[in-house]
Image: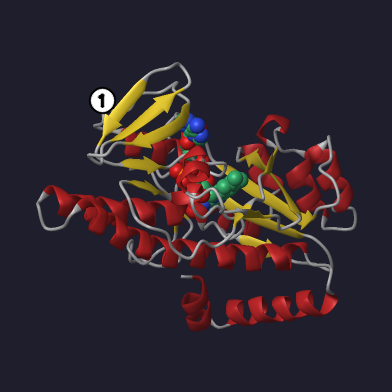
């Protein structure tokens, strides 16, 4: 596994690792051969009297199985059919992110803080997060080294020129931070969806379930969404394995999975919404308190570990 590490722990299990999406996707697909089929758009499902689930796709084709797992992301079509009353919350924030390639030229002027660790910058208004990704194996040509940045602010409107908008907002900031944004490849700059799912307390379990952003979408502040989806996948895998070995019935296993998934996923979503509120907040008192808190965490490693790991 190609892995990028900016951790300060020597224990690889306890350390925090940043993993490239390209690599993670390749790892998750490895060994699946033709089991995964691309290019189909799911439109709806039906559960028969015997409990079999049939999924329908927009090309008119269907697929029938014992269980349907809706892992179709933020605007999940499976969620819409399974839980039609479940709504979305609008955190009223915008997020814009981009990447600056790490080359001998950019490394010459980038300050070491930006090329060696994660940073949260929380001045009087707005918020900037930076993180660094370095290949463990520099000869690997399927990805590259870069500094990623994400800017979050209260949303009044989504600007057309994302890079120009962030640069204008960083007017009085340190020149290196402005340069980080200004010299980022414009094709790497995009806005993020800040949709958050409303907590759903429980529902009658059936052979149709949900996983990841499809059930607990959250703003991408705090880096929790993908981790929560992986937690769900692991928990559901264990539950379905117990069905396969005859230890549990399907609906019982799905019920157990959904209970653990709701507690973990909606907990992470609530945390991400707290970070978003703070990042987009215009309250001086709230921001000053948060700065003091993060500074304290930075100065006291055991507190930092307890809070962030
Ligand atoms: C800018 C940004 C940065 C992030 N950084 C982090 C981070 O550092 N750490 C972290 O843990 N998380 C992070 N996240 C969140 C993370 O990307 C998501 O939480 C994660 O991808 C959710 O995985 P998922 O499988 O549930 O959904 P997705 O990854 O959204 O996958 C859903 C899939 O379903 C497909 N699909 C949708 N509808 C249909 C349909 N009708 N028919 C067929 N297919 C369909 C989509 O094409 C997609 O391939 C970030 C998100 C963003 C936007």
Residue 298 lies, with reference to residue 73, above or below; the image says below
Position of residue 237 in the picture relative to residue 146 (left or right): left
Q: Position of residue 227 (x, y in %)?
A: 44, 55
**Element carrying mark 1:** loop
- Res. 27 image quadrant: top left
Q: Position of residue 71 (x, y in %)?
A: 43, 42
Query: Foreground: 37 or 12?
Result: 37
Disc 1: which residue: 33
Among all residues in the image, which is located at the extreme front? 49
Q: Position of residue 182 (x, y in %)?
A: 79, 41
State which quarter of the image contains the N terminus. Answer: top left
Tell me if I can see residue 219 in this picture.
no
Tell me if I can see residue 159 in this picture.
yes
Query: Foreground: 208 or 299?
Result: 208
Q: Which residue is drawn at 82% across and 57% down?
A: 174
Number of marks:
1
- Res. 97 image quadrant: top right
Q: Where is residue 47 in the image (x, y as percent from the top left)?
A: 33, 38
């Amino acid at each position: 596994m190609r892995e990028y590490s900016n951790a300060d722990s020597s224990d690889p299990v306890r350390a925090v690792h940043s993993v490239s999406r390209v690599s993670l996707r390749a790892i998750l697909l490895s060994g699946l051969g033709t089991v995964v089929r691309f290019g189909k758009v799911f439109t709806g499902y039906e559960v028969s009297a015997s409990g079999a689930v049939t999924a329908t796709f927009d090309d008119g084709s269907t697929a029938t199985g014992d269980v349907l797992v809706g892992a179709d992301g933020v605007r999940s079509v499976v969620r819409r059919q399974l839980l039609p009353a479940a709504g979305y919350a609008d955190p009223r924030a915008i997020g814009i992110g981009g990447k600056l390639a790490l080359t001998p030229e950019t490394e010459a002027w980038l300050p070491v803080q930006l090329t060696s660790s994660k940073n949260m910058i929380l001045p009087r208004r707005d918020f900037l997060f930076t993180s660094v990704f370095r290949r463990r194996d520099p000869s690997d040509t399927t990805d590259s080294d870069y500094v990623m940045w994400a800017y979050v602010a209260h949303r009044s409107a989504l600007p057309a020129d994302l890079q120009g908008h962030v640069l204008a907002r960083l007017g009085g900031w340190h020149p290196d931070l402005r340069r980080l944004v200004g010299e980022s490849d414009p094709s790497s700059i995009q806005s993020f969806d800040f949709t958050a799912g409303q907590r759903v307390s429980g529902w009658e379990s059936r052979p149709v379930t949900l996983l990841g952003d499809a059930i607990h979408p959250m703003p991408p502040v705090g880096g929790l969404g993908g981790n929560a989806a992986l937690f769900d996948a692991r928990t559901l895998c264990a539950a379905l394995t117990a069905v396969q070995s005859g230890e549990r019935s399907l609906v019982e296993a799905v019920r157990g999975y959904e209970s653990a998934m709701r507690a973990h996923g909606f907990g992470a979503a609530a945390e991400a919404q707290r970070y978003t509120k703070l990042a987009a907040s215009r309250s001086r008192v709230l921001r000053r308190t948060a700065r003091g808190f993060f500074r304290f965490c930075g100065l006291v490693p055991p507190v930092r570990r307890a809070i962030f790991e």
